[in-house]
């Protein structure tokens, strides 16, 4: 009945199919696992009494995809029976702006002040543009909008415009023909209210060009509208009020007003979409989404309802005077609530409507199940703890961790400190040497023991071989000794031993290459200084290369050699001769 009634008051318009929707349908045709829109309509026609003349019946849901069998409007809820989404979330073959809700506005005419064929061809790309203005103003207006909201044909902006028409200008706010089961008295009252709203508050924004050197201030954001740009004016508002194109929004939902259609509120001097302007003065039913014109209604869950529409979201059973439960936005009867009921974390049974429950960290318990796992004592008036994947009272809790300082257990009820997989009572987190608390200061972890910075420097840090002070930064290792970089100097001349300076060692002390020559031994053969490895013969030092066979001249420092009675040195070969 609802569909035939809507059909009787609907003018079907053949709209161009958006490109991205056409591509989706091409994929559907080539994939046998996907139910196409045509098949959806055939299935709905076979299993329901809904007239298939409604152009939007069977349309796929843009939100649920293949999870929806096709759009089929609930008898009085403004939602799809199959997926629960509103109509605007489905593909729409019919342009909502074509539904005759008796709004005689300039947006119905798309005449433009332009004579150029090129300009008119450019405007044909849009499904809507501001009427009765110049081509340049239209162009600047479109450029000022967010890219995804520009109403180009076959774009997401076109689909968004359709959705906003249904959302901002619901037909059932203006005409009783689109409402469900109104009495004659309610119809007359609605028509009277609707005519008054349209006559007094309804208007269409006009886009105008701001001359160079002129400045206006946007009513919405408060910022200036600079010259050589465009702005929007509302005839119902006070003279001089202006908006940026992207700021001409509903004061309540903050959405751009579709096709610049607004309702003006003189009380607060703000513009609204049709939906939220109506809600300034009238109550909207949370069930059917229509305005309530009866003197009495039901109020529950912070919302208002027609008495007959306060019913189960799943089976439509009337809940007036009955017990009900909630799950998210759904209001459910006792029978349907079982499918959504919270389960008790202890007994795993549903928590029924009317039963008291305890909620803890996203889990639920019956009152009778909120007991200690071990002693079964009621925990509602006692301290309890999480342990063993359950709840334990204070008497039954066992230390789960051990303090690294005192070696005693740490109860989960007590806050504690952790460092490298070890745990401490706060009072045990101290320096092992001076017993200073380390909670608010720096500390060092040395050989699995905590030390404050002072004790670590005094007792652990290496000392400089020159100044004997602790080394806390980069240092120099020379032999078995460690030096501050600034203390690593030549023992003789005091020059810094860094960079390209060659360092020599004499009696465990560092010398630069120049100073070590002063103290070096002299080769017994060549009398030159010895600064590297050498050999000693009869208490006389020789360079390796200077200790030679007296006959053939070959070095014998690192090989077998012979000495004659005349103290001549001979190599093995020469000695054999």
Image (cartoon, rainbow, N blue to C red):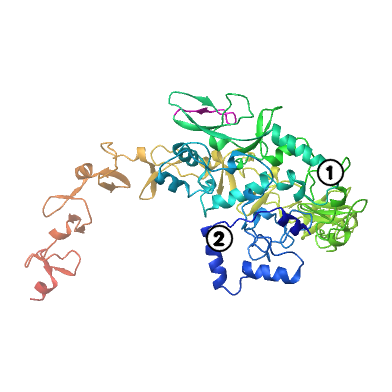
What quarter of the picture does the C terminus occupy? Answer: bottom left
Residue 311 sits inside the magenta stretch: no
How many discs appear? 2
Q: Is residue 457 visible?
A: yes
Residue 222 sits inside the magenta stretch: yes
Q: Position of residue 532 (x, y in %)?
A: 22, 53
Q: Is residue 242 left or right of residue 535?
A: right
Residue ID for mark 2: 21
Q: Position of residue 275 (x, y in %)?
A: 71, 42
Residue 174: image quadrant is top right
Q: Is residue 379 visible?
A: no
Determine whether the residue tagged by mark 1 lies in a helix, strand or loop. helix
What quarter of the picture does the N terminus occupy? Answer: bottom right
Q: Position of residue 471 (x, y in %)?
A: 44, 41
Magenta residues span: 218-227
Q: Main secondary structure of the magenta part?
A: loop
């Amino acid at each position: 009945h609802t569909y035939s009634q809507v059909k009787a008051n609907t003018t079907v318009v053949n709209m161009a199919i958006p490109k991205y929707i056409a591509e989706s349908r091409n994929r559907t045709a080539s994939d046998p696992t996907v139910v196409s829109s045509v098949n959806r309509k055939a299935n709905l026609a076979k299993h329901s009494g809904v007239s298939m003349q409604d152009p939007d019946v069977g349309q796929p849901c843009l939100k649920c995809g293949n999870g929806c069998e096709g759009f089929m409007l609930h008898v009085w809820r403004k939602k799809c029976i199959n997926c629960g989404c509103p109509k605007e979330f489905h593909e729409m073959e019919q342009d909502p702006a074509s539904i005759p809700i008796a709004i005689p506005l300039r947006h119905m005419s798309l005449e433009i002040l332009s004579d150029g064929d090129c300009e008119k061809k450019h405007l044909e790309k849009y499904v809507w543009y501001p009427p009765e203005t110049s081509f340049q103003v239209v162009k600047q207006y479109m450029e000022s909008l967010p890219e995804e909201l520009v109403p180009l044909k076959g774009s997401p902006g076109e689909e968004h415009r359709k959705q906003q028409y249904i959302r901002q200008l619901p037909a059932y706010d203006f005409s009783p023909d689109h409402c469900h089961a109104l009495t004659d008295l309610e119809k007359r009252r609605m028509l009277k209210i609707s005519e008054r709203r349209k006559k007094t508050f309804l208007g269409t924004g006009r886009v105008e060009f701001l001359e160079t050197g002129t400045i206006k201030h946007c009513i919405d954001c408060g910022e200036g509208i600079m010259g050589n740009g465009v702005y929007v004016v509302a005839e119902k508002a006070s003279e001089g009020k202006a908006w940026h194109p992207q700021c001409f929004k509903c004061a309540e939902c903050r959405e751009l007003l579709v096709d610049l259609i607004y309702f003006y509120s003189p009380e607060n001097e703000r513009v609204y979409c049709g939906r939220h302007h109506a809600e300034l003065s009238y109550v909207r039913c949370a069930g059917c989404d229509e305005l309530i014109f009866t003197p009495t209604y039901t109020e529950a869950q912070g919302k208002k309802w027609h008495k007959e529409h306060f019913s189960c979201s799943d089976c439509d059973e009337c809940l007036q005077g009955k017990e009900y439960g909630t799950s998210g936005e759904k209001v459910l009867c006792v029978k349907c609530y079982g499918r959504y009921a919270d389960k008790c974390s202890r007994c795993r049974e549903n928590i029924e409507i009317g039963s008291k429950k305890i909620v803890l960290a996203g889990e639920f318990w019956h009152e009778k199940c909120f007991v200690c796992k071990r002693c079964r004592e009621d925990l509602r008036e006692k301290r309890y703890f999480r342990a063993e994947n359950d709840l334990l009272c204070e008497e039954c809790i066992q230390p789960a961790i051990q303090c690294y300082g005192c070696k005693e257990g740490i109860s989960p009820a007590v806050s504690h400190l952790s460092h490298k997989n070890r745990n401490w009572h706060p009072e045990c987190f101290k320096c092992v040497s001076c017993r200073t608390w380390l909670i608010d200061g720096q500390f060092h972890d040395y050989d699995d023991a905590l030390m404050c910075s002072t004790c670590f420097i005094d007792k652990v840090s290496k000392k400089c071989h020159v100044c004997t002070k602790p080394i806390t930064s980069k240092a120099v290792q020379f032999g078995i000794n460690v030096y501050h970089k600034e203390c690593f100097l030549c023992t003789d001349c005091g020059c810094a031993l860094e960079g390209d300076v060659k360092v020599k060692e004499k009696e465990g002390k560092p010398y630069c290459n120049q100073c070590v020559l002063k103290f070096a031994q002299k080769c017994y053969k060549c009398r030159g200084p010895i600064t590297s490895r050498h050999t000693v013969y009869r208490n006389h030092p020789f360079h390796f290369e200077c200790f030679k066979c007296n006959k053939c001249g070959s070095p014998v420092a690192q090989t077998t050699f012979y000495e004659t009675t005349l103290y001549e040195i001979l190599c093995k070969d020469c000695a054999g001769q």
